Structure formats: C-alpha cells, structure tokens
Image (cartoon, rainbow, N blue to C red):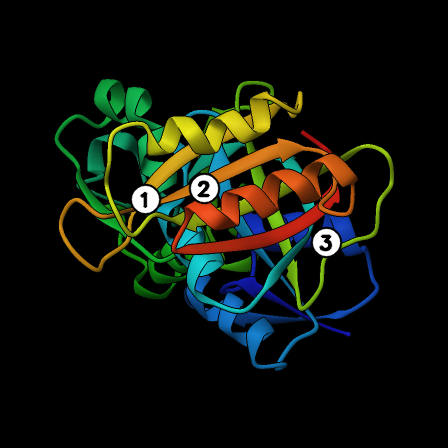
Amino acid sequence: MKIGVLGPRGTYSELAARSYFKDKGEFVFYPMITDVAKAVEHGEVQAGVIPVESLREGTVGEALDALAWTDVRVQAEIVLPVSHSLLGVGGTTLEKITQVLSHPQALAQCRDFLREKLPNAELIEMASTAKAAEQVGKLRQQHMAAIGPKELAKLYGLDVLVEIQSGETNVTRFLCLSKRDERRTGNDKTSIVFYTDTDRPGILHEILGEFASRGINLTKIESRPSKKALGDYLFFIDFEGHREEDKIKKALSEIKEKTAMLKVVGSYPKRF
C-alpha cells in the first residue's frame, strides 16, 4: 500500500500517517498538500494524509481547496499532539539567528516565542516544516534556524536549540484521504462542501435549518473563497452522523435542491 504525505521526510503529516497506519504501507512524499490529494485522485497512492486544522491557528486553507476541487473522500481523521522546536546547526545561538524558516502554520503557532526571543529575525515561509529543516541542514549557516518537530534534528543533522511548545498546548487534526469513505460505526462524522449560485437573504439560514430541524449537530462551519469571483464563497460543514443515516440522507437531499453544488466529502469515525 502506498500512502501519500506532505514531504520531505519528518513532517507532522508523516508522524500522523505513521501513528495511523503503523508499518502497513510505503510512504510517498509530495511537496504540497494539493499534490497529495491529486495523487490519491489519480491512483498514484491508495491513501493520503494532510493537515486540515490546528488548535491554535485554525484551518489550513490549501487543505479545504483540495477537498473541494479534487475527487477524493475523507476516510478517517487523525488528531496528533504537536510539539515545536527551534532547530539549527551546531554552535548556533539565539543571538546569531537572523532568519527562521518553517511552514506558515508553525510560524504562526510560535509567534509569542518569536516575538519575545527573536523579534528581529526574518520569518521565511516554507512548504513544510521538514522542507525548512532540510534547507537549514543543507546550507549549514548559524544565522538560520528552522521550526518543526524535534525528530527533524536527527534526519537533517541539526541540533535542538529550544523546545518551544509542548503537545499539551497544541494539537493538529489531519485527514486521511482515499477514493471512498468509511462505513457506519455508530460514532461518525460527515464533511460536506457546497456552493450557492445566488446570494439572497436567508439562503444560508435555510440550509442550516435543514440540520437544525432534524437535530443534527454541526461541529464546524467555515467559508472559503471559491476563486471564481470576488465575494463568492464555498461553505464547508462538519456534522455528527453518517451520510447513510435516514435523517442525514433527507437533510442532504433538501440541501442539494438549494445549492448549485453539493459534495459529500466523506463520512468517517469521529475522533475529535
């Protein structure tokens, strides 16, 4: 079994995938979240793991776009405690650091540490925490440091300079993508995305009412630009229950009549 993850080696996505799949497959690394989703869509891998939401910084926009615009389904959710460390080559001190590299989410999650300890450092966004560590390990400059899991230090020949944040204060939710979702377990969650072709008063209220009238509990609702026109939005909703349950089938049928596009991204066991 081939499993696509955000690369290179050592990302939180890989750690999440290993926690879920154990040693059941071969990991294939991709540079972007969208690339992982497309690899699943095109059959290059049988599953893919992507980050979708962090406790501290909320949703990962690229992940929502991938769910909306690629033909994939959510098969499972994985919740992983995240611990960030500052990584650098031997001899690096905080006083020497003028550049800090990491994924935008990791930089944002460590903003308090950066503001207090490295207020003048240039923050450089990378495609992943592992890519940042790889770059610092390759260039081996004492003015550069990366933020990511401490496991990256051994992979890329770096030292753990500071342990910034423990997993007790930060968790990230990952989604396992496949070509199909999971069967009912009795403790499930469903994710959908929809688009309304006309913006009229009350349309979102009407759609949400289909859930409320049937006692379906929403666990998340979020909007994301459709990229078709300024002011146009996709809506993403997570709710308790499985798409095969009668009340949810009825709700989705009514919602489909009120939307220009409705995609059931998947039903899967509830973990968070």
In terms of depth relative to the viewer, which is nearer, 212 or 60?
A: 212
Q: Pointer 1: what residue?
A: 224
Residue 123's place in the image compared with 95, above or below, is: below
Q: Pointer 3: what residue?
A: 18
At label 3, the amino acid type is Arg
Measuring from the top left, give residue 59's x and y in whole percent.
Answer: 42, 37
The answer, for residue 162, to whether it is visible in the render is no
Instruction: Judge the density around disc 2: few (<14), some (14-19), many (≥20) Cα neighbours within 10 Å.
Output: many
Q: Residue at x 66, y 24 (%)?
A: 214
At label 1, the amino acid type is Arg
- Measure how far apart labels 1 and 2 are at the Cα level: 8 Å
At label 2, the amino acid type is Phe
Q: Pointer 2: what residue?
A: 236
Residue 71 figure quarter: bottom right
- Measure how far apart labels 1 and 3 are at the Cα level: 30 Å
- Secondary structure under tag 1 reads strand
